Amino acid sequence: MAGRRLVVIIGQDPPPRLDKALARDVPEAEHLSRSRLARLIADGAVWGSDGALTSPKARVGAGDEIRIDVPDETETDMAAENIPLRIVHEDDDLVVVDKPAGMVVHPAPGSPSGTLVNALLHHCGDRLSGVGGERRPGIVHRIDKDTSGLLVVAKTDRAHHGLAAQFAAHTAERTYLALCHGVPSPGDPRLMGIRGISAEADGAIRVATNLDRHPSDRQRQAVTFGAGRHAVTRLRVVRDWDEVALVSCRLETGRTHQIRVHLRHSGHALVGDPVYGGARKVSEKRMGVVRARRVNTFPRQALHAATLGFSHPATSDFVSFESALPPDLSALIGSLDDHANDTFA
């Protein structure tokens, strides 16, 4: 079979089914969804020590070595679209993009066009790695549609494998800036009493849990302490306005919705997050009418991928990139600083 062979070692306390165990333990950078893994199992492309594993319900144990033959991807039929991109860096192997909020990274049901991939196909032509699959050419990692900021895209298969290995090993460095409700403090006994949250010697707040799909809403993630994938976020307050804080979030791991779920778990949900923020509002009485309304009507999750660093897969040199806050977040912070026209309820 043409393609590549992926070797996965099943971790501790695996789910009882093969497809679920692989969905948990295959590195996210491989972009193998549970449905695609099920198809590979049905096609006889998944192997254990005793031969092919052809049932998604096959049982696996911790430490089992599972081999997956991932076939070469077919040519994409997605359209290249002339969508402006902010290119932070580009060379023969990769391109670093500063994605605007509102742009989906790759096509999916409901978002067949207007995505970052469509824009990259126009910008790069056929110079994108095929490792990510026909709908994800070049995509090594993702950020949510309504999150702005940096991500790196592979133009060669060598770069894709090298970058994917770093994201899987958690050696790529990523820091986000976020506006959250309240002010997280390592001196807050309520916060320190939440399972999975602790203070570090340098004053950072460490959130360490597992994350898994929400039991009743498959589009959401939920904190767990059994099943799921290990996730660690380190938080540090940069500025605060009593009711709202600007926090720096450094990812040790990079799970789906990780920062959004961890901030909710801490009791300091992201401003503007429609999924994990609930109906939380800041007080007009305590913050002032104008400032409170600007916070309460912010139209997206206030999250920005501000820094990105990794070892360049072609040279092994460490490279890093920064992205300034986008205009909408900068304007919101400016309004928090502006008391001139404020009134209090």
Image: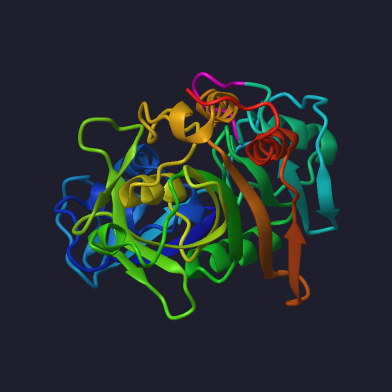
Res. 179 visible in picture: yes
Q: Going 54% across and 38% down the picture, which residue do you hit?
A: 144
User: Which residue: 66% across, 29% down?
Assistant: 115
- Residue 8 locus on image (x, y percent): 36, 65
48 or 165, nearer to the observer: 165
Which is nearer the eye, 52 or 153?
Answer: 153
Q: Residue at x 35, y 29 (%)?
A: 278
Point out the residue furthest to the top here. Answer: 110
48 left or right of 332?
A: left
Residue sitting nearer the eye, 207 or 329 = 329
Scheme of colours in the image: rainbow
Q: Residue at x 43, y 81 (%)?
A: 201
Q: Is residue 256 visible?
A: no
- Residue 27: image location, x then y, percent: 43, 58
The stretch in magenta equals 106-112
Is residue 237 magenta-colored? no
Give the quadrant of residue 340: top right
